[in-house]
Image: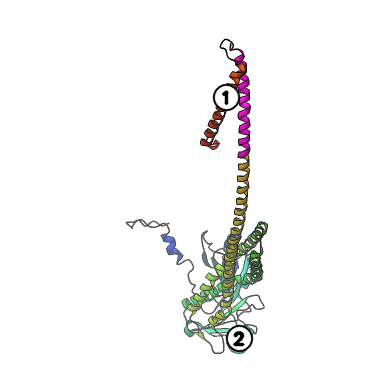
Amino acid sequence: MSEYFCLPFSTHPLRDNLYDELHARPFQIISTPQQISHLALKAQPAELNEAFRLLCELCRRYSVNQPGPETVSFEQNFGEFTVRWERHMEFYSLTFLRPAGCGAEPFRHPVIEMIPQDWTAQLPGQAVAAFHIVVDDGELPMDHDALTRYFEGQRLIMSQPKEGKALLCTAFKLHSDGFGRFLIQNRGISDYQMGRLVQRIVELETYRLLAQLSLPLAKRISPELNAMDQQLAEMLAQIPHIETGEGNRDLLFRLSTLSARLESYRAETNTRFSATRAYHELVLTRLQNIQEEAVNGHMTVAEFMTRRLTPGLRTCQSVQGWMEDLSKRIERAGDMMRTRVNLTLQEQNKSLLAAMNRRGRLQFRLQETVEGLSVAAISYYLVGLLSYVLNGVPLEALHLDKKVVLATLVPFMLGSVWWLTQRIKHRLIKEPLGEE
């Protein structure tokens, strides 16, 4: 972070980075004529680091300046050619440029042939975009036969960017060398304007291909979603006919399995579909920036993109919306099944509580019976103890009969034992065991 001691106030630590971000990928100044080869390779974070290491190795091989460790965009003249390297979130790009004419066959000897093949063979990741761009100064013939030869007989998309000050030709197809091809004829724009035009065409084609990466994924998942939709419909149709709790639990388990499969698809596609939307918006922005005009008898780039790219985006959006809708329907069905299971459990709990109440009443009656027997037994033993006590008392001197005394004391003993038992029982009821 830079320190500006002339400022009387403190600055945000990211202020310099915010300014530098606007200039991280500046437009190139491209003279006419020019040969360009562009590569964009989708890579994982480790592969991005390996690509940066290879770039430094190429710089050392040609004894030129190397990029800094935090560089996201690097451009260096290697003598006969120039290399531009850019690092993005999920891919990196390499652009090779040579300011020279190309003769009668513009794509026969592209600039990438000048790059050491042992170096290009080590590039990590998977190439998504690989195409050549030829910037012509008006020397190339542009008649039908010549264009047919340049693009190997492919049907051409042609337009006049920069309000007619340039001519753009492409087929948006791969050719015999495995590369795409773009031909730009300069009809009066400056080198700076040509640099912006080339940069926008490069980004247009790169983002177009990256946006289409999710289309095969959407096509692969669509049949699976259709089968899952039918399974869900069959499960919902079974709900009114399920009468047992076991059936409810079984159907709830099947719904959970279906939901897990759907969530795995959503996790697999969410990032890719979100990237597709972002790339598509970038493509539309680049189409507006090139300011193209139509060429009689040919589709413009914007018309071609609208006709071919937009339906693919709609397909991805449809599949993503389908998964969202299916997820909500499975969630609602699961809630309904859980409600049914809870109601069944409540009925079972109600029956269980009723049975417990019946057993409690039986136990209480049995306890009362045992309580009466206990009073009699305790009284019996107390009367026996009292009999032993009376044996030691001189009842004859008091003119009392032992049997008469015992018979008289028995009701008192029974009453005392019964009263004591009731006191103990009431004390236990007032002070439950849980509170002790």
Residue displayed at 33% across by 56% down? 9
User: The residue under label 2 is which amino acid type?
Assistant: Leu
Q: Is residue 95 visible?
A: yes
Q: Which label belongs to residue 392?
A: none
Which image quadrant: the N terminus? bottom left
Quarter holding residue 425? top right
In primary-sequence order, the first of circles 1 and 2 is: 2
Q: Position of residue 358 (x, y in %)?
A: 62, 45
Does dot 2 land on a helix, a strand or a loop? helix
User: The residue under label 1 is which amino acid type?
Assistant: Met
* Residue count near mark 2 (Cα–Cα under 10 Å), binned few <14, some 14–19, many ≥20: some
Does dot 1 land on a helix, a strand or a loop? helix
State yes or no: residue 366 in magenta: yes
Q: Position of residue 141 (x, y in %)?
A: 58, 87
Determine the residue located farthest toward the left in the rendered image: 8
* Residue count near mark 1 (Cα–Cα under 10 Å), binned few <14, some 14–19, many ≥20: many
Report the span colored magenta.
364-391
- Front-most of 363 and 131? 363
- Front-most of 177 and 376? 376
Looking at the image, residue 434 lies above or below residue 321? above
Residue displayed at 60% across by 39% down? 364
Q: Is residue 136 visible?
A: no
Majority secondary structure of magenta residues: helix
- Front-most of 35 and 252? 252
Query: Where is mark 2, residue-wise?
Result: 147
Q: Which label belongs to residue 413?
A: 1
Determine the residue located farthest toward the top in the rendered image: 397
